[in-house]
Amino acid sequence: MNTKSWISALLLALTIAACSESDKASLELSGLNYTDAWITTFSVNEYGGHGISPNGGGGAFVCCITIPRKWHAGMKVTVRWTADDRVPDLWKERVVEIPEYTKEDMGAFAVHFYPDDSVKVLVTSKMEGHPDYPYPRPN
């Protein structure tokens, strides 16, 4: 391969890489615990989260999870968590659908843990407590 062909191939590869990178967004990951138990740690598609106190969370963020900039139907993530660091192999796992989001929602990726071991996720620019926040704390 001559120098001109090599440079052309390199430029093409860089262009393709730049386009594919622009299709992704990195968001901070945050967890909200609506249970009475500690969540020792959690992850979303193997992106590590943080510990969350009982009925706490929402204020700590971990960088970062990568998601497509454009939402499409059927997008899912795998959420894993453990609530007991004395039994490190006691992990729970749920596959959760990501609700529709827009570019205006790109702020954080919030994970909500409920007492029945259900999990909801959300791409949002709003904080819990905002009147339009779709997942209020259960009473």
Image: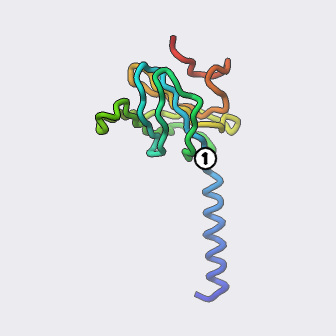
Most foreground residue, 110 or 49: 49
Residue 137 location, x and y as percent? 54, 17
Q: Residue furthest bottom?
A: 2
Give the amino acid type for the residue marked by disc 1 in the picture. Ser
Q: Quadrant of residue 118?
A: top left
**23 over 89 or under it: above or below:** below
Q: Quadrant of residue 100?
A: top right
The residue beneath circle 1 is 26
Tell me residue 113's x, y (percent). Answer: 46, 26
Label 1: how many Cα within 10 Å (few below 14, some 14–19, many 20+): some
* Residue at 54% in and 45% down: 65
Where does the image place residue 104, in percent across and percent down from the top left?
Answer: 70, 36
Q: Which part of the image, by quadrant, shows the N terminus?
A: bottom right
Query: Total label count?
Result: 1
Would residue 91 be found to the left or right of residue 24 on screen?
A: left
Percent across and percent down for residue 40 are 41, 33
Q: Residue at x 45, y 44 (%)?
A: 45
Q: Secondary structure at mark 1?
A: strand
Q: Residue at horizontal 44%, vertical 20%?
A: 35
**Furthest-top residue in view?**
139
Quadrant of residue 130 within the rendered picture: top right
Residue at x 47% of width, y 26% of height? 53
Q: Is residue 93 left or right of residue 71?
A: left
- Type of colouring: rainbow
Spot the residue most to the front.
86
Residue 139 versus residue 22 in the image, above or below: above
